[in-house]
Structure formats: structure tokens, C-alpha cells
Image (cartoon, rainbow, N blue to C red):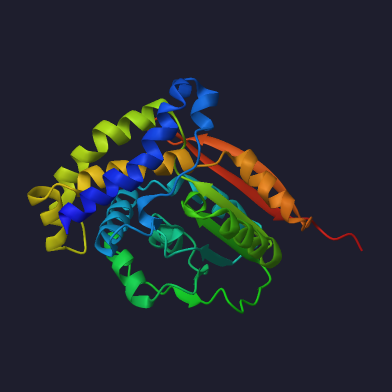
Amino acid sequence: MSLRVIYLLLTRYLKKIVVPVIGNLGFLHRQSFLNIPDFPQLTRWKYTPNILKTLLDEYLNFIVAKINANRGFVDEVRVAYTNGLRNFHMISPEMAGSAVLLAKELQSEFADLKIIAVSDEISQEHLGKIGLLIDFSGPVAIEPRNGFKPKEGSFALCLNAWHRMTDKEKSQAGKFLLTNFDQFLIGEANSKSLWQLIGMILFVPGMALLTAPFIRPFRWERLAYTYIFPVFPFVLSLDGIAALFRIEPPEKIKERLLQIGIETHEIQCRKVENGRGGRLLYVLAKRRKQIS
């Protein structure tokens, strides 16, 4: 299977990356870098074997949990809590690096906060595996997105998922958020920059080699595709590069939300240093108070 993986990556996926980048050799200039044509991540590419998708997602969950990359968003949850919001909804929790990784920290700080994973694609078993990474076994309810019933005093957090969605999925997610929640935050724990690109090329493969035995759940396949057939570090680097190029600035996310045509929320754009050479990027939407 490793030869097939290498063949597919070289003949199909690399063409999607190398050709656009070579065609935009001015990408070191910031504006050109931001406008390199779009291409899919390996985690959502139809030709990527399922085992590699699983290994990629587990690695991302492991790293985001270890460096607590989502912690910078807790301040906005704290403000929402102070304003009386108690129902905390995690959007797209099945995607790696999601808000689920904040569950332990949130429940330890906000005892009466009800945490709900909103998804048609996640199970308690999946949540349990994520909980092992953050030493968390507390209750997280699952509520299907299909047929979702909005609750008063609800806050939604969609983290590190927006860049993995298609345009259609972004429109659907935006409509769902605007329709059902008093406040919501769409955030990315990283941003496009030259330093981040260099890190994805040089640093990430080395991290894959160093951390493979320690990622949970343990898998022999991870060791095989890291040390015997060293496909995984290469794949991980490519997926990270694709993720960087797919990240949208907050202004673009706001524009997408406004195009949906549901003018019920005030939408703010935020950029905050993340301490790792990049920025936290997010939009924060608050429902306008109705004037009676």
C-alpha cells in the first residue's frame, strides 16, 4: 500500500500544489502568498487511504492538545459566560483540532457550563479517544445537527474546521450558526506566514519522527508508516502546507457570512498573536438586541 500511496501523492496531489506555487513564485510577497489557488487537504482528499486520514487527524489532535493551541479562544468563552450564556456548543467536533480539546479546561473553570458536541458524524467512543489526550472523562452531550433545536443563551465555537470545509459546507455552516445561536465564534489557531510555511516544511516532519511512539491511541501502522515506510512525515508536511493555504482571513469569513443574507448578528473580526510565530484568527458574532 505504501507504493500506491506514494504514486498517488506524486502523480495527483503534488500536481495540485507544485503547479500553482510555481505559477506564483512571488508568494514570498504577502499578497501573492495569500492568493495562491485553492487545493484540498489530504485529510479530505478522496484518494487518500483511510488509515492515513486517521493518522493525520490523531496527530493533529495530539499536537493541538499538547501545546494547548486553542487556549487563546477561552477569553471569549469567559466573556460569553459572564454575559449569562450557559449552553456551549462545539461545532464540527469530528474534525481534528476542534473545540472538544478545550472541554477539560472549560468544565474546570465553568462548573455549570453545559458542553454539547453538535454533529451527525461523531460518537461517544470518538469523544472518549479525544478525552484521553486531555485527561478528561467528564460528560459531553452529543446533539445531531440535523433537526437541531436552538436553545436560549447558546454560544457556539467552531475551531480549526472552517479551512477544511468546501465552499458549500461553509455556506451551510454559516447559515446554521446564524440561525441557531445568540453568539458564535469561528476560529483558526494558526495563520498564513512565511515562518509557518518554513515550519511545515522543515520542523513538522521531524516532529512526526520524534512523537510517533507517544501519540494515543497507539497504532502499529503509525510506526510502520513513520519508520519502515516513511510516508507519514512527508504526508503530514503536505497536509500542513495545504491547511496554511486554505486558511481564510477573518474579513473573508465575515464576507461569506454577510452573503448568506441573515442580518441578525453584529460580526467582528479579530487577530491575536498565538505565541508560535502566527496568529489566532477569528470572527465573533453576537445577535443584535431586538428593539420592541
What is the residue that sits farthest to the left in this orientation?
228
Image quarter where the C terminus lies is bottom right
Residue 129 shown left or right of residue 31 in the figure: left
Asked which quadrant contains residue 170, the reply is: bottom right
Q: Indicate the position of residue 223 as horizontal and vertical percent values.
A: 12, 55
What is the residue that sits farthest to the front in this orientation?
11
Compare residues 224 and 1 and report the one nearer the observer: 1
Residue 32 shown left or right of residue 58 in the figure: right
Q: Is residue 67 visible?
A: no
Q: Is residue 117 visible?
A: yes
Compare residues 23 and 226 and report the one nearer the observer: 23
Asked which quadrant contains residue 218, the reply is: bottom left
Q: Indicate the position of residue 148 as horizontal and vertical percent values.
A: 61, 76
Residue 172 shown left or right of residue 165 in the figure: right
Which residue appears at 15% of the width and 43% of the height? 210
Q: Indicate the position of residue 196 as horizontal and vertical percent values.
A: 38, 32
